[in-house]
Image: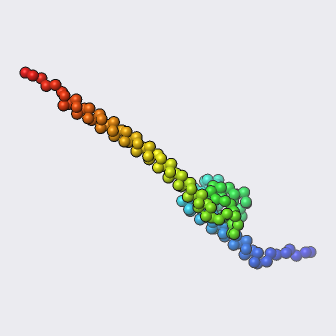
């Protein structure tokens, strides 16, 4: 009867390091977006408990599930692993670009709103001036 080969302890430790890194980066990315575990779970079709477990490094996860979670978090799945793939800065730069676009769009809307407010203000003042002219010209009755 042949003995089963065991993995060296260092290999187990390496795997645990990867699991811990992935768990920490998932949690950090979720928190950076201001989402609760429950909110993130709903987006990923997972329970809050499952998100908690994954962020604690408990249990196993498929690459497909990791990929889905990374997509929801708007990060490259490779950034969840140690020393591979694009850096986390890419995800941050991407998020910053989206934020800048939103601010620019809001600025354009604010500019258009200011123009509309100015048009309303000038029209309103014009109406008031006309009303004042009408009250000044109001004929008086001679007795």
Image colouring: rainbow
Judge by depth and name the residue closer to the eye, 113 or 51.
Answer: 113
Residue at point 19% right, 28% down? 137
Q: In which quarter of the image is residue 127?
A: top left
Name the residue rendered at 61%, 53% in the picture: 43
Quadrant housing residue 28 = bottom right
Asked if residue 129 shows in the view, the reply is yes
Q: Is residue 40 left or right of residue 124?
A: right
Disc tally is 0
Q: In which quarter of the view is residue 112 placed?
A: top left
**61 left or right, relative to 131:** right
How far across and how far down the image is residue 120, in percent?
36, 38
Residue closest to the far top: 143
Q: In this view, does 120 lie above or below 11?
A: above
Quarter occupied by the N terminus: bottom right
Please give the name of the residue rendered at 72% of the width and 75% of the height, measured from the top-left corner: 13
């Amino acid at each position: 009867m042949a003995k089963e080969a065991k993995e060296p302890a260092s290999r187990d430790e390496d795997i645990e390091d990867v699991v811990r890194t992935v768990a920490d980066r998932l949690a950090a990315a979720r928190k950076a977006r201001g989402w609760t575990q429950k909110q993130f779970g709903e987006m990923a079709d997972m329970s809050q408990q499952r998100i908690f477990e994954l962020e604690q490094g408990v249990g196993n996860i498929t690459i497909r599930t990791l990929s889905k979670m990374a997509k929801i978090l708007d990060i490259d799945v490779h950034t969840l692993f140690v020393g591979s793939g694009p850096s986390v800065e890419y995800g941050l730069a991407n998020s910053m670009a989206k934020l800048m676009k939103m601010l620019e769009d809001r600025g354009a809307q604010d500019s258009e709103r200011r123009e509309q407010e100015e048009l309303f203000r000038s029209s309103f003042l014009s109406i008031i001036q006309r009303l004042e002219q009408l009250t000044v010209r109001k004929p008086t009755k001679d007795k």
